[in-house]
Amino acid sequence: MALIADVCPHCRRMTRCQVTERTSVSGGIIMGIPIVIPHSSTTFGCGECGCEFQSETWNQHRSLSPAESVGLDLEQILSLTNPVLYERVMLERLRADARLEEVFVLLGKLRPSSLHSDLKRSLMNWSQLDEEQCIHFLTSTRRCTEAICFTEVMASRTKSGGVGCLGGILGSAGVWIGCIALFGTNVSLMGSLGILFAGLLTGTSISGLLWSARDRSWLQAVLLPEADREKICLGWLLQVLERSRLSEEAESKLASFREIAPAIRSHMAAEGKAIKEPEFHIRTTLASSNKA
Ligand SMILES: [Zn+2]
């Protein structure tokens, strides 16, 4: 007899539920060949009212034997057997904490991404944080929110790549015209392909060079001074550019702006300034208690 924790749809209570697995077979004969199809279903019996139901959240993660569940409270059983519901319940409980209001705004703004997972993991640990860690977590989420707002504003101020595109097209055309002048129009198929490829390669290289030169000057003249003035943490700016995903509308504006992240890193490295990789969570208490 296995059990999980779930909310019964009949009595609406969170309880220990008994797992019932049923297997059956159906079959028939198709073109003289006997066919047997096995079926299995899992239902749960509510520990309070006895109602049998199918879980909306149990993802076959695992169930516990009665021996395994000895000494565990309902919340522990829920976290082990029904993590989707556990997360939902925990987040709902944390939402009532006024200190976490900005954190939930940020969580709602971020779409599934590694930064979103980091934030949710740290938020789920909130009740285990000491005061120093709480302050660090709240400060980090504020820095991250500021970096997102800054990113959105700056993305709308970036110029289009007209110069880079035009330079690329002129470069390609120059190579093609030069080749026609040198070899004439009577060129073999392989020769034509070679000229086409050389033209495209030249165009792409020129476009790339103009783009990176433009990025570098914009980075130094506009982005970094502006970030400094707005007191934006560069570490969080990079986390947002490299590890976040926002709404579709925001993403359409941010797509090309995200490409500036490597330029920020190489510029700071060239200046000899280290960028600290910020995290929502700190583990200083554990480290210091180990030292003690
Ligand atoms: Zn029930």
Image: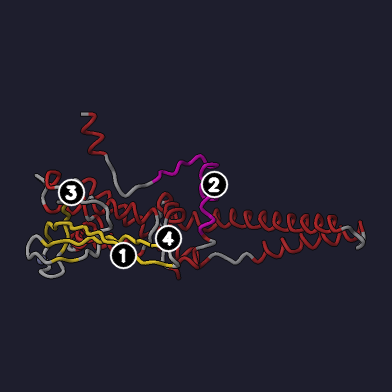
> Of the residues under marks 1 and 2, which one precedes in the sequence?
1
In the rendered image, the residue lying farthest to the left is 48
Residue behind mark 2: 267
User: Residue 287 at x, y = what percent?
Assistant: 26, 34
| Depth order, front residue of 4/248 | 4
Q: CA distance from mark 4 to mark 1?
A: 46 Å
> Of the residues under marks 4 and 1, which one precedes in the sequence?
1
Query: Under 8 Å from ligand 1: the CB of mark 3?
Result: no
Q: Quadrant of residue 46?
A: bottom left
| Depth order, front residue of 15/226 | 15
Residue behind mark 3: 64
> At x 92% / y 57%, what residue is drawn?
183
Q: Is residue 264 magenta?
A: yes
Residue 245, numbered circle: 4
- Colouring used for the render: secondary structure
Say which of marks 3 and 1 sits in front: 1
Look at label 4 and name its amino acid.
Arg
Per the rendered image, the range of residues in magenta is: 258-277
User: Residue 283 at x, y = what percent?
Assistant: 27, 41
Q: CA distance from mark 3 to mark 1?
A: 30 Å
